[in-house]
Image: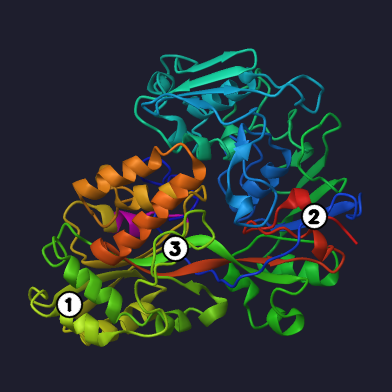
Amino acid sequence: MSRQRGHRGVGVAAAIAVVVLTASAVSLAVPSSTTAREGGIFRISLPTVAGLDNMDPALSFTPAGWALLDTVCARLMAYPDRPPPAGLRLQPEVAKAPPTVSADQRTFTFELRTNFRFSDGTPVRASAFARAINRTLAPSMKSPGALFTRHIVGALDVLEGKRRTATGVVARGNTLTVRFTRPTPEFLALTALPFFCAVPPTLPVDAEGIGVFPTAGPYRVTEYRPGERVVIGRNPFYRGSRPHHVDGFEIDLRAASTDEPIRRIERGEADWTTMLMPVYLNPALGLEAKYGINRSRFFSQPGLTLRMFAFNTSRPLFRNNPALRRAVNFALDRQALQAILGGPLAGRLTDQYIPPLVPGFRDGDVYPLDRADLVRARALARGNLRGGRAVLYTTDFTVAIAQLAKQQLAEIGLEIEVRAIPFHISSTNYLDALTKPGADWDVALVVWTPNVPDAQVYLNLLLETQHIGGTNVAGFTSATYDRELRRAARVPQARQREVAYGSLDVRAARDAAPLAALSVLNEPTFVSERVDPACIVLRPALVLTAVCLR
């Protein structure tokens, strides 16, 4: 699943896709504001195609857009500019404290700090966040943010053009109240998305987006020419606690190819870009040989994207058959499968559904990662093969991994028919094939990239019955797990919530096994020689507000 316009699913959802990225761990120090050099312009190069989509927070839905908006946004709750795990634990930003939440998890009340100012000097009130929410619901805006705000009370009236504002969003001075039509424990994490950036209460609705307007984060956009250039400077009225060492950012949007930004960084003409890992691993670039991994310029940080096989529990082979699902998990040689996609540099092996970076992860050592355990696999498969035939869906560019899985599963008596579905990054062909009624697949290779790094969006969205037909692509249904997942989502204390999800993750992978997790993909970072390594914070992508220059 990936951050794309037109993605599907329920709640915090994104389209299922199959992509290739890479992984390896790195821990960098967080610089003191007294030791980091201040000033200078940080230069970014992005390709014209598949680069920046928009600088309007209601419309942007790409990694490049979100990285840039992070420098100018002020949000109710945010992730600190620190490496994980601290950098993935939500904390108040414009809110004074976490909100008061009703017992039914439907009403959230925030009290705002009084020291935040827009870049034109006007104070940030609750109306700034109410406007951000209502802009995502404006029908002419066609904002992807509506996926995350459509369950607010009155949201459908706005989406249908019956009202201009949602009745469930009430702003009075520095108090913001948001009411939902259903329990929405994930709302705190959602407020960290760019869709919830504070915007001026009078900011118009514009289907093409508004790229230059007063913002309340450490920086502000001073110039935006779509397809050409973005200029970002400091917000002179910013009094928040986020680091902001450089004077600003200049973004060139005219690179002719995906390789060109990387070559510009090598030549010292740019300082950073954002791209999928296969681009960085192009042998013609030779980045690993030139700079090594995780030293000072080329980094490979464990990311948040989970690659897995999903079992179609709505079909006879895997329905009510956890023994066979577990047998497949034991029969898979994850290390051999990963080797096809680049080996250790291309991802960190896993057998669980919460990635190691996400708070709540607990290593349960459920299945062997470096080999298959055919003794246990065959014992579990015996008597549970139900004819022993399965259809495996994959995409037309991941056939090799499917073919190897076919060989591995033959060892336990499963005869696999591989079907390659055409996939394009801008389409939903593969998702449509998986989720259409009566789809005849039994196993499917998918990835899941949530929009927020929260255990709830890995477990609840992948496993809860209410998400069947959307993010619960396996069609897994269990009253027991539904009950426990909802209970975990409602635990108010962060650390206790993490413990609850950590336990659920291990038990779901070990006992129910509706999925076979394979690996966590990596987030690549490559910077110029003039970027100070002491100011590189990877969360897991580069945090632009924290950068400084030598």
The structure's colour scheme is rainbow
Residue at 23 percent across and 54 percent down: it is 476
CA–CA distance in space, label 2 to label 1? 52 Å
Q: Is residue 102 left or right of residue 191?
A: left
Sequence-wise, which precedes: disc 3 or disc 2?
3
Q: Position of residue 452 (x, y in %)?
A: 51, 47
Residue lying at 38% horizontally and 70% vertically, measured from the top left: 351
- Tell me the quarter of the image containing the N terminus: bottom left
Stretch of the chain drawn in magenta:
426-433
Which image quarter holds the C terminus? Answer: bottom right
**For the residue marked with disc 1, what is the amino acid?**
Leu
User: Mark 1 to mark 3: distance in Å?
Assistant: 25 Å
Say which residue label 1 marks. Answer: 380
Category of crowding for the residue at label 2, using alpha-carbon neighbours closer than 10 angstroms: few (below 14), some (14–19), many (at least 20): many
- Residue 267 seen in render: yes
Foreground mark, 1 or 3, reads 1
- Mark 2: which secondary structure? loop
Mark toward the start of the polypeptide (2 vs 1) = 1
Please tell me which of labels 1 and 3 falls first in the chain: 3
* Horizontal and vertical percent position of residue 177: 51, 19
Q: Is residue 335 above or below residue 9?
A: below
Q: Residue at x 59, y 69 (%)?
A: 277
Real-space Cα distance between discs 3 and 2? 28 Å
Give the residue pinned by disc 3: 306
